[in-house]
Image (cartoon, grey):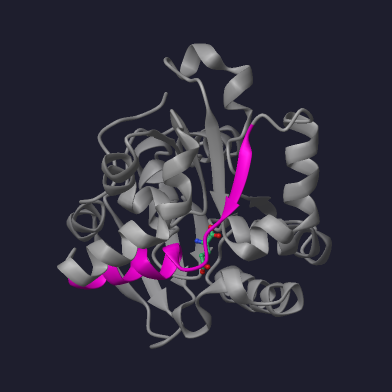
Amino acid sequence: MKQLKTRIGIFDSGTGGFSILHRIMKKVPSVEIDYISDDAFAPYGEKSDGEIIERSQLITEMLLRRGCSLIVVACNSATAVAIEALREKHRGVQFVGVEPYINVLNHKDQFPGIKKAAVITTELTGNSQKFKELKQRIDPEERIQHVTMGKLASIVEDILEGGLNEPLRLNLHEELEPLRPLGLSHLILGCTHYPLIASLIERELNVTTVSPGPYVANRVSDLISSSGNEYTSDFFYMSTNSMVWEKRTGAYLTSLLRYSLAGQDVQ
Ligand code: DGL
């Protein structure tokens, strides 16, 4: 008898979650994937905790109605403020969130050449209790500087939509300005949008970036006991602007990853 595939739901405020989605597609066989891009309410990073909790609940319910049994909150901001409320309300459902990988200094073997690191996040993530606790727990001596980025997620959306033109290159250059004098060797990307332009960030700042995608994919893989070896090359996609589900191919995803470091896996 053919085994029913596990259905995974993934959401983010926009395209940021694709930096997690493509890792899951490579790592977890025999699953079907639904992705919701909450464009109607983006960006999340500037909203209040209450608003993000409400949106996350609404989107989770849409994914549950599609039959998803595991939800990946592919957004640092929504993970920071909403994941506990989601777990509380939907007790039978597994939720996997995303957090910035700040314990780099404790894993120097994985990050050769690491000397000085900083973490960048949205305002919402940076102000959240969850992020503050994580930072305090893993980096009590504050060796890793934290910098909030106001517009970077929106700049990523613009670059992916229209390509990297001169005005956008300038916007990016200005947005990254506060990081330049820090003399960083490594930059931890604390918003899922940022890895989508990791190659541009690395070139601008001459740093190595650190993204949580592979760790999240490992966690999802651990939670799903699939025995097959058939990796999915497409997924179902819905933007909250259109509210229409459509099938998207791996080729579409590859085109969105053109400014990322998709070829270079951390592990
Ligand atoms: N991609 C999201 C994150 O990881 C949110 C970006 C935004 O909408 O501000 O925080």
- Left or right, 36 with reference to 259: right
Q: Residue furthest top?
A: 109
> In the rendered image, is residue 2 in sight?
no
Q: How far from the left and from the top, in percent, is residue 71? A: 59, 57
Q: Residue furthest right?
A: 88
Question: Can residue 161 be found in the magenta stretch?
Answer: yes
The quarter of the rendered structure image containing the N terminus is top left
- Magenta residues, as a range? 144-162
**Which quadrant holds residue 137?**
top right
- Left or right, 227 with reference to 206: right
Q: Nearer the viewer, residue 199 or 70?
A: 199
Instruction: Tell me the residue at 41%/54% (across/down).
Output: 177
Q: Residue furthest bottom?
A: 242
Q: How many marks?
A: 0
**Which quadrant holds residue 239?**
bottom left
Instruction: Tell me the residue at 44%/72% (across/down).
Output: 37
Q: Nearer the viewer, residue 115 or 35?
A: 115
Q: How far from the left and from the top, in percent, is residue 5? A: 46, 50
Instruction: Tell me the residue at 52%/33% (across/down).
Output: 218
Question: Can residue 145 be found in the magenta stretch?
Answer: yes
* Above/below status of 22 relative to 44: above
**Which quadrant holds residue 136?**
top right
Instruction: Tell me the residue at 48%/52% (across/down).
Output: 178
* Above/below status of 176 relative to 202: below
Q: How far from the left and from the top, in percent, is residue 205? A: 34, 41
* Above/below status of 136 relative to 47: above
Q: Nearer the viewer, residue 88 or 127?
A: 127
Q: How far from the left and from the top, in percent, is residue 68? A: 56, 61
> In the rendered image, is residue 146 in sight?
yes
The quarter of the rendered structure image containing the C terminus is top left
